[in-house]
């Protein structure tokens, strides 16, 4: 089991991991085309799951293309496809809950492991697929992150620079990036002076072409977009101070 050191977890992060279908999920509009959903304490037992995944998954360091060259990421990673021998059942439950919320099949589950504050990920956007793929033609991929273990800052900024905003994600918190986030915004987990182990379980829906109808209604983009079924419905929609959400793109 990964050692969480003297990090003071609350009881909520202990015990059998399970999705809390009643957790409030709030949507924040970043600009005219992009949003994030934030569900605090969406997963019970986050610390327990971190310990389990630390022992179960085949961790490796990952090389990634950044700023035009290949670099070693200062963190570990492992695939965790639901239903595979290494994946705990709750990973499948999380994927199913997210599928219901966003009306999209989850195509991949990947776990990042930040062993301490030296591990991080620099500003980046998630890949939208090869040239000519739906992601490059305007489809909006959903990227959902469930944070486990010690708290870490998750930062966002407009692609190419601008004022950054950040959220402290605690064990069991859900953050979902949607709309045109992977084209118009960058995200990062900065280094920290001291940080207990943390993992992010990331769920991705491959971008699919949007029809004129779904684009107009926002369908397929979550509880607020009209395409979602029950699950954790959006409890509030807000605009970030200074966002251009009211302007047309
Ligand atoms: O660990 C996180 O919260 C961010 C993960 C991330 O940015 C990524 O894997 O692309």
Image (cartoon, rainbow, N blue to C red):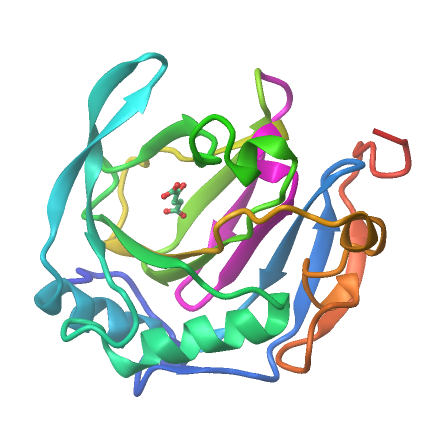
Q: Is residue 11 above or below residue 33?
A: below
* Quarter containing the N terminus: bottom left
Residue 107 forms part of the magenta stretch: no
**Above/below status of 38 relative to 132:** below
Q: Quadrant of the C terminus?
A: top right
Instruction: Tally the marks.
Output: 0
Q: Quadrant of residue 129?
A: top left
Instruction: Please tell me in which quarter of the rendered image ligand 1 is found.
Output: top left
Residue 54, given in percent of the width and then of the height, sits at 14, 63
Residue 94: quadrant of the picture: bottom left
Q: Position of residue 182 (x, y in %)?
A: 55, 36
Asked if one can make out residue 1 in the rendered structure from this viewpoint, the answer is no
- Image-based side of 134 in relation to 153, left or right: right
Magenta span has 177?
A: yes
Tell me what residue is drawn at x 80 percent, y 32 percent.
242
Residue 211, can we see it? yes
- The residue closer to the viewer here, 116 or 157, is 157
Relative depth, front residue between 115 and 223: 223
Question: Which residue of the protein is positioned furthest toward the bottom in this rendering?
Answer: 16
Residue 27 is situated, as x and y percent measured from the top left of the image, at 71, 57
Residue at 38 percent of width and 75 percent of height: 10
Q: In the image, which residues are magenta?
A: 161-183
Q: Compare residues 211 and 193 and report the one nearer the observer.
A: 211
């Amino acid at each position: 089991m990964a050692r969480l050191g003297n990090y003071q977890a609350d009881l909520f992060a202990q015990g059998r991991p399970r999705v809390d279908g009643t957790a409030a999920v709030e949507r924040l509009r970043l600009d005219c085309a992009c949003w994030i959903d934030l569900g605090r304490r969406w997963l019970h037992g986050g610390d327990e799951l971190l310990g389990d995944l630390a022992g179960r998954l085949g961790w490796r360091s990952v090389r990634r293309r950044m700023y035009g060259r290949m670099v070693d990421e200062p963190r570990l990673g492992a695939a965790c496809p639901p239903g595979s021998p290494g994946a705990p059942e709750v990973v499948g439950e999380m994927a199913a809950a997210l599928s219901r919320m966003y009306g999209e099949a989850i195509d991949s589950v990947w776990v990042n492991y930040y062993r301490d504050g030296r591990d991080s990920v620099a500003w980046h956007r998630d890949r939208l697929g090869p040239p000519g793929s739906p992601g490059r033609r305007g489809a909006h991929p959903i990227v959902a992150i469930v944070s486990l273990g010690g708290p870490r800052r998750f930062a966002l900024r407009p692609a190419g620079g601008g004022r950054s905003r950040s959220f402290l994600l605690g064990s069991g918190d859900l953050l979902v990036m949607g709309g045109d986030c992977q084209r118009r915004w960058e995200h990062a987990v900065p280094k920290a002076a001291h940080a207990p182990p943390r993992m992010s379980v990331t769920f991705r829906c491959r971008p699919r072409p949007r029809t004129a109808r779904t684009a107009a209604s926002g369908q397929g983009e979550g509880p607020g977009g009209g395409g979602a079924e029950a699950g954790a419905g959006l409890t509030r929609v807000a605009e970030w101070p200074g966002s251009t959400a009211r302007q047309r793109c």
